[in-house]
Image (cartoon, rainbow, N blue to C red):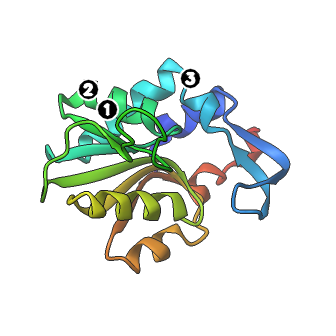
Amino acid sequence: MPNQDLIDALRAANAVQYGEFELSHGGTSDYYVDKYVFETNPDCLRLIAEAFADRLDGTKLAGVALGAVPLVAVTSAETDIPYVIVRKQRKEYGTGNLIEGDLKASEEVVVLEDIATTGQSAVDAVEALGEAGAVVDRVLVVVDRQEGAAENLAEIDVELESLVTADELLADRAGE
């Protein structure tokens, strides 16, 4: 069942745009979901945090820098579950961390993401967390573009769960 309140909020915030767009993996699309629009909108953030909270069981959270940091922060505040931030590359100063925050060996972690297309960013985060000793078997994403992310994550035994799929988000384009 689609999360209609979230779909409506994403549309109202103008986070869903139509035209021709180049995507981060190099492909093109006739629609674009602008994560920075919905991640800076309090109504969208509130609905996302509530929806993520409904799917969590107390397992530590992780967010991929930069896009998922607002999502993991508001979800942590909503649930009182601590989180870590996964950098895309090791920082070259200070501690040189790839994982920021308190992470213990063998700790179970759920990765939160903004948008999944191929899932490569989530795969990289899961691998970095695994190298740090964490156990990850699930990624929660706001929007699954349904372009291979679930299959790519399944190859490393990780389940992708979305709040909204592209099919749901684009089901009624007449109102756009």
Whether 86 is drawn above or below 136: the answer is: above
Residue type marked 3: Thr
| SS at mark 2 in the image | helix
Left or right, residue 3 beside residue 165 = left
Q: Which mark is residue 40?
A: 3
Could you give the CA–CA distance between mark 3 and mark 2, rounded to whole angstroms?
A: 17 Å
Q: Which residue is mark 1?
A: 75
Q: Are marks 3 and 2 in contact (CB under 8 Å)?
A: no
Q: Are marks 2 and 1 in contact (CB under 8 Å)?
A: yes
For the point 45% across and 48% down, which residue is it?
A: 90
Could you give the CA–CA distance between mark 2 and mark 1, rounded to whole angstroms?
A: 5 Å
The residue closer to the viewer here, 18 or 70, is: 70
Residue 109 in the image, given as x and y percentages of width and height: 23, 52
Extreme residue in the top direction:
42
Could you give the CA–CA distance between mark 3 and mark 1, rounded to whole angstroms?
A: 14 Å
Q: Are marks 3 and 1 in contact (CB under 8 Å)?
A: no
For the point 28% across and 63% down, which residue is it?
A: 130
Residue 169 in the image, given as x and y percentages of width and height: 60, 49
The residue closer to the viewer here, 42 or 106, is: 106
Residue type marked 2: Glu
Question: Total label count?
Answer: 3
Q: Which residue is mark 2?
A: 78
For the point 60% across and 59% down, which residue is it?
A: 145
The residue closer to the viewer here, 163 or 105, is: 105
Whether 55 is drawn above or below 167: the answer is: above
Q: Earlier in the sequence, mark 3 or mark 2?
A: 3
Residue type marked 1: Thr
